[in-house]
Structures are given as C-alpha cells and as structure tokens.
Image (cartoon, rainbow, N blue to C red):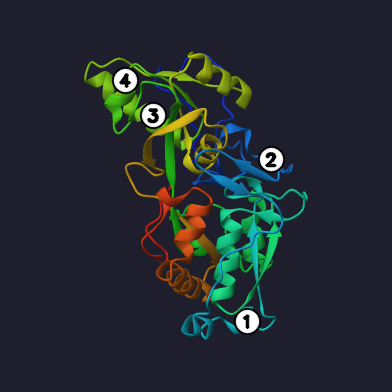
C-alpha cells in the first residue's frame, strides 16, 4: 500500500473529516506497511487486549503462551545461513507490535505475538536458529537493518523498487486492500470501478487506497456513472459510527487489520479484495540488508514452511489465508517509485 502525497484530488474530495481507518502506512513515500499507523478498527494499540478474542469465525490467542506449530529444520537451507548470522545461533528479527493480527503485545503487555511473529519464529527454527524478536517502531527498521542491529524485519514491509536499492527481500504474503461493508449491508461485492459508483466510501487521506479510489472514480465519471462520495474521519470511532449508522456504505483500507476487526466484532464483512499496488501486484516480504546473503536463505526457509504446511497453518490461525503466497520469491518485482 503506497502512501502518497496527493496535492490535488481532482475535485472528488469533499471537505471533510480524516480517517484513521487506515493505514498500515509507509516509509517516506513508498509502499504500505506501518502496522501501527491507524490500523482499521482501532486495533492498532500496544495495550493488551482480552486473553482471547472469540467470534463465530475465529478465536485469537493473545496470551504470551502461543503453543506454536512444530517446525522441522531444512538442513540444506540451514547450511547456507551466513556465518555472521549463524555464529550466535540467533536470528534477530524486528517486528512492530501495534496492529493485530500482524503483531501486537500479548496480555502481559510485553510479549509480541501475531502472524509476523509466528512466521519469524518458524523461519528461524527451520534454519536451525532461535528467533530473537525485537519490538521496533516501524519507522526505525530501515536504519536498524542497514546498521546490522536487525538481521531481518518481518513488519508488513511492501517491496518497492526504491527499497530494493538498499535491501533484499523474500516474499511471504500478498499485499491486499479490502472493501468492508456493514455486516447486514445489501452490498455483496466490489470487484471493479463500477461497483463503487455512487457509493459513500470511507478512505484514508493521502494513502494508496485513496489514490486507487480516485482513479476508479475518474473512470466512472468518464463513463457517465455516479461519482464516489469520499469520506474522511479523524478517528476510528467516528468512522465506525458512520458505517454502522448508514451514513457510509463502505470502508477501503488494509485488509489484514480490517479482517481481524470483522472477525472479532462481526459488525462488518469483506466484500472485495484489491491488490495493494493496483493495477500491479504488491508483495509483503522479509527484509534484510542488501548483499549479506540472508534473503536467499530466508526464501528457502519460507518455501520449506510453505511446502510442509506450517506456513498455511500460521496464516489460517490469524485469519490471513486470503493473503497467502504459493511460493516465496527472492526480490520480486517491486512497486515503482511514485
């Protein structure tokens, strides 16, 4: 999800209100990813939630005792771990525990848990290492990787061509944006621009999702269809109230956090998924220092986890199966510089 500075909104923007719906925001001007930047549903918080969040669809274990899946060592991949990383037997991984289900502090207010943490732990184990999970503010990871403080980052980082100049990547999830409607809404699908014509849509100002929606709106108006009514809210409570009261039809933002919210409160439903780099595909990837040799090893380890089924179990556990990849790619095509 690319955070952009949109100086002109082509007349589509109505005075308004802003939005905390969303964003897993982005490094400087690039792609989505800060899991702590106003995650949908107000879920982005370092405060510990309830011991377990239960719904008809999902039960999320948010205790420090995670009872993770058993992982087998990939001997071939483990043998290729660079000596500089292997020597202490640990893999130091930065995560940003501010937005479930990606990463959040557990009920003890100090232990990071979530999808990114589970994948980091499993990746380390399949490489014969012990994961050392380091809570990190999302904006701090680039310097931490470049300085060698972190050997890898699993923090919802989207691959961009600009980032590939400084970092290497091994993909592990598709970057997806989600359209969500009130659970009893008559809206059942959003697949293309025509599906949002005339709709009242809550979106984050200056985000990639807003940019996509603006392009869809222009496409609709060129075809004589009704324009989108863009709505912006300063806080999540106002956004939720607008949707639940019927003043808005849809929200459009990062899917991972919105899916968690929908699963936990059952007040919203997914009606459409869009690639985070629409019309391009966007990839979320383990991020390492460029040229240190670890990205290729991480790719092998991730593919081992995909092949033995552990990866799929982890994503299902956190409600993210819709963002699964068939295989990890080394330095996949990144989103272009905006």
Mark 2 secondary-structure assignment: loop
In-front residue for pair 208/178: 178
Residue 246's tag is none
For the residue carrying disc 4, how many other residues have a C-alpha within 10 Å: few (<14), some (14-19), or many (20+)? many
Asked if the residues shown at circle 2 and circle 4 are in contact, with their CB atoms under 8 angstroms apart, the answer is no
Q: Earlier in the sequence, mark 1 or mark 3?
A: 1
> How far from the left and from the top, in percent, is residue 27?
56, 47
Mark 1 secondary-structure assignment: helix
For the residues labelled 2 and 3, the Cα–Cα distance comes to 27 Å
Position of 42 with respect to 186 (left or right) is: right
Q: Earlier in the sequence, mark 1 or mark 4?
A: 1
Image-quadrant location for residue 200: top left
Tag 2 residue? 45
**Which one is in front in this view, the residue at disc 2 or the one at disc 4?**
2
Q: Earlier in the sequence, mark 2 or mark 4?
A: 2
Tag 3 residue? 213
Tag 4 residue? 197
Residue 86's tag is 1
Mark 4 secondary-structure assignment: loop
> How far from the left and from the top, in percent, is residue 311?
47, 63
Position of 276 with respect to 265 (left or right) is: left
Residue at image point 67% right, 66% down: 147
Which quadrant of the rendered structure holds the C terminus? Answer: top left
For the residue carrying disc 2, how many other residues have a C-alpha within 10 Å: few (<14), some (14-19), or many (20+)? some
Asked if the residues shown at circle 1 and circle 4 are in contact, with their CB atoms under 8 angstroms apart, the answer is no
Q: Is residue 157 visible?
A: no
Q: Earlier in the sequence, mark 2 or mark 1?
A: 2
């Amino acid at each position: 999800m690319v955070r952009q500075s949109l100086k002109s909104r082509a007349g589509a923007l109505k005075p308004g209100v802003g939005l905390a719906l969303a964003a897993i925001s982005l490094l400087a001007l690039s792609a989505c990813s800060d899991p702590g930047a106003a995650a949908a549903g107000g879920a982005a918080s370092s405060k510990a939630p309830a011991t377990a969040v239960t719904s008809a669809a999902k039960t999320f274990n948010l205790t420090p005792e995670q009872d993770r899946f058993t992982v087998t060592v990939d001997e071939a991949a483990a043998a290729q771990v660079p000596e500089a990383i292997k020597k202490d037997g640990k893999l130091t991984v930065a995560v940003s525990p501010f937005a479930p289900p990606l990463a959040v502090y557990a009920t003890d207010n100090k232990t990071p848990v979530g999808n990114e943490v589970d994948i980091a732990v499993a990746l380390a184990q399949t490489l014969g290492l012990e994961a050392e999970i380091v809570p990190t503010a999302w904006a701090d990871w680039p310097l931490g990787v470049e300085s060698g403080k972190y050997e890898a980052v699993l923090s919802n980082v989207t691959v961009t061509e600009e980032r590939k100049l400084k970092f290497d990547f091994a993909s592990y999830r598709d970057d997806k944006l989600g359209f969500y409607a009130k659970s009893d809404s008559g809206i059942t699908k959003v697949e293309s621009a025509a599906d949002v014509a005339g709709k009242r849509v809550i979106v984050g100002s200056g985000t990639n999702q807003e940019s996509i929606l603006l392009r869809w709106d222009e496409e609709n108006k060129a075809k004589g269809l009704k324009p989108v009514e863009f709505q912006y809210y300063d806080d999540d409570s106002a956004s939720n109230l607008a949707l639940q009261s019927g003043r808005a039809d849809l929200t459009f933002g990062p899917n991972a956090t919105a899916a968690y919210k929908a699963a936990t409160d059952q007040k919203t439903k997914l009606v459409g998924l869009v690639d985070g780099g629409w019309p391009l595909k966007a990839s979320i990837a383990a991020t390492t220092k460029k040229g240190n040799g670890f990205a290729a090893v991480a790719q092998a380890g991730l593919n081992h986890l995909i092949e033995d089924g552990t990866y799929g179990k982890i994503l299902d556990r956190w409600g993210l199966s819709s963002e699964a990849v068939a295989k990890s790619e080394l330095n996949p095509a990144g989103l272009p510089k905006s």
